[in-house]
Amino acid sequence: MTDLYHQMKNAVLAGFMDKDKYILEDEYAPKLLFNSADDYVKTHIDEELSTCQSFTFAVAFVTEGMLTDLKVKFADLALKGIRGRIITSTYLSFNHPKVFRELLKIPNIEVKILDQKSSFHAKGYIFNKDEYQSIIIGSSNLTEQAMLKNYEWNIRLTSYQNADLTEQVITEVEKQWASASYLTNDWIDRYELLYKEIQYRDTIETSDSIAETEATYEVIKPNKMQIEALNSLKEIRINGKNKALIVSATGTGKTYLGAFDVKAYNPDRFLFIVHSETILKKAIESFHKVLGGPREQYGLFSGNIKDKNARFLFATIQTISKEERLNSFDPEEFDYILIDEAHKSGANSYRRVIGYFKPDFLLGMTATPERTDDFNIYELFDYNLAFEIRLQDALEEDMLCPFHYIGVTDYEWKDNIETDNNILQRLVSQERMDYVEEQINYYGYSGESVHGLIFCSMKDEAYEIAQIMTDKGYRTVALTGEDSIERREQIIAEFEAGELDYIVTVDIFNEGIDIPCVNQVVMLRNTQSSIVFVQQLGRGLRKFEGKEYVTVIDFIGNYKNNYLIPIALTGDNSRSKDILRGRLRTSQIMGISTINFSEIAKERIYESINQSTLDSLVQLREDYRDLKDRLGRVPGLSDFSLMGSVDSLVLLNKFENHFKFLTKMGEKYHVKSGENAILSFVSQELVNGYRIHELLLIQMLLKNEGELEKPTFIQTLEEQNIRHDDATLKSMLEILSLEFYTAAVSKKYNDQAIVIEENEKYILNDDIYRSYQESADFSWFVDDAINTGIQKASEYNQFEMLTIGKKYTRKDACRLLNWESDESSTMYGYKNKYGTCPLFITYNKKQDNKETVAMYEDEFLNSGIMHMFTRHPRKLDSPEVVKIVEGNRLGEVIMPLFVKKSDDEGSQYYYLGMVNVDQQSVKQEKMLVKEELKDVVTMNLILENPVKYSLYLDFVK
């Protein structure tokens, strides 16, 4: 029997008999699948597709959106020659005819249909692999709701070649497949006639009462997040404040939100100001729907229309800011003024108007508050940020139309991928546009006809693309900054009327344009700004009748700025490569919106992240300035993480401590040399939060005049369910006394113990306590650093030495495994000491062309077994090998496993849990080193906790 057979046998026995007695191999184990905050049925479908040789889906219902979401994976499989089958049905006439047409576009999938009479209502997914099959069976159809949102139950099973259950499932599938009809265009044409007849009949039966209700009265009510915002605005006014700012993502209904608040306030006179007359006219309609009343109460103050005396006046900034028109108003004429697109308020025209009027309440609204000049929008509104609705939150709350983002590679020229130095001829070549057409047709759009926006890099490119698309039969027009407002409005009107298929533009649609019908966004340009990326994405996120989702197709070239794509899509502002890589590795799902990259595009973004400088001084200065603007004060270290800004560890890795960072930012604080050393110690060694003990002890000592009884501290640890064994407490003291560190590191931290223990009592260094009492600056920095570390510590299991799935360095391992000193510099791949033998494995090792070094082929055999090589030269009877193998067998040596994908990911490794040596697998072998065969010992390591499957796949790809 093969190793796989025994592994699967163990998994089955663990899953159905005794999980403590048998090893639970993650990819083979039976598993209940359902949609939760950090796990989705769709994620498991993706994972199984990534490792299969063929597949069969047997599902009653398929939606176009879910199919769009999976097309990236299907395209990757097609490149590998992997094919699949889908058998579905016409049951209840659920499947739209367009779904069947989309299925025909997928070249590596064969589709068959069972008719209505069969009442086919199955939901099963079969994945064929080398020696076994994986099967997912349960309640999830191939729909967005079932795969991403609904509470569904599915069971994932694996079975060996000759398993009875697999045979039963496959036999039944083949039986249904044999009786089904092949999907063809002729079949779809016939089905479409029947489908329309059924839809028409159902519409007639229900339309009379619905039409009567809807025609007579349209009620617009605030949604959940708008209610929260309105309550916040009310609270601000109750507290006597007369200004506020609302940050609301594009498409989340900020105009309606403003109208709801105006209705609640009930002003005698109201003024709405924005930069665009197009927005102005739509705003009047929205306000009238909410406020009601005679239309003559609503006036326009723009161009040739000056309804100056209207109760609700809607003005363009260009018109009202002119001095003679502004002076025609009494400064106190309006008791409520709303500035839309308030991020533009730094312009002289806005400042002139805002400085002139004296309303009882001033509200600013914007989707992009980020500073783009020297203007602080938060200061203008007295730092009263009433509410914030960001893109990711809005998608989770179903406030926007869902999107399916697809990142594909751009066109390749003779094996050379497009670069930053592209010439116009390449950008608009016939070959590239043929490729673009192929992709936009494959991934499609929601609805009966396409309403697409194409964003490109240059004006000339826009005109050329529009011409090529027109020649291909698509009704396409280019719009650039050179076009007048009148022409833009005319083209948009034609687009909305269905007279155009595509508008090609460069930058004029980034904001201030509302075209709800957009159902496809095509990005044919290098991402230079995450803000602009979100603005362009937002053009398609407004809900619209007949539009169930937006397809976003991003053509990703070999650009150095590709790392901005995941930043923009996820809203991650941490500046941490580690966090960004983690977001790219796992499925990013917001509501039923999804982010998908082809395998090549994903690797391209990985490479961009690895090569980028996310924490440049220029970028950090900008982030600092934005956060200071937002808070209205100098931010503490903890503020960055709390406000979703830069990860505090990114700052500390670059600047040693927060005092040095603020000094670099031009702030004036005074900290003595010795105080700076202590701040650096806390910041560099403790703020990561890996172990909370040192932080808690310093905090308690500072609050208790520098002394604390040891039993009191232990009691605190017990109450908070924190590990408190003697070895950990001893290690904690070795850290705080600096005994753990090398002489060079100890000298950097002033060579003085921070805490000592005497007579069952912890005592804080006198100099530190005195400085804390006497220096307000020093005490603020110390408290801030400790609070930041305690905040970080909540992310780790403080009852265990290490937290599975978190990342650590060799030095961290020495500390957290309670070693007496830092021996990371001599640890290399592993080191056996103090009853522990931590193992550090770099999975994808850099190849040396000169073959001057040994290439250890450590690898996962599956998610629960790591095949490992010892150092060379080693034999079975080498003392080092005997101590590890025998020590582990006797329970005298524990072996924590740490793995990273490559050296590009820095010095940190994922902790994957404890491993045990498979005693039967230990072998002596030969390995080529410098063209000479050397002795080496290999062994299989059994993980006590199999690697999370998504991380395992990321390692082994």
Image (cartoon, helix red, strand yellow):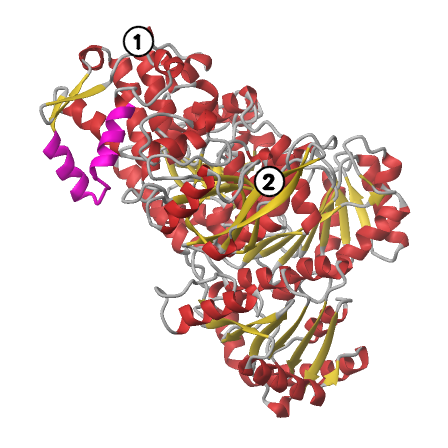
Q: Is residue 546 at least partly visible in the picture?
A: no
Report helix, strand or loop for mark 1. helix
Mark 2 surroundings: few (<14), some (14-19) or many (≥20) residues within 10 A: some
User: Residue at 62% across / 91% down in the picture?
Assistant: 118
**Where is residue 422 shown, x and y percent of the image?**
82, 33
**Where is residue 446 shown, x and y percent of the image?**
66, 63
| Residue behind mark 2 | 935
Q: Amino acid at mark 2?
A: Asp
Q: Is residue 719 magenta?
A: yes
Name the side, left or right, on which 554 lies relative to 499: left
The stretch of residues the image draws in magenta is 710-735
Task: Please name whichever residue, 287 or 579, is drawn nearer the observer in this view of the structure.
Answer: 579
Identify whether 806 is placed above or below 328: below
Dot in front, 1 or 2: 2
Identify whether 10 is placed above or below 749: below
Q: Is residue 387 at least partly visible in the picture?
A: yes
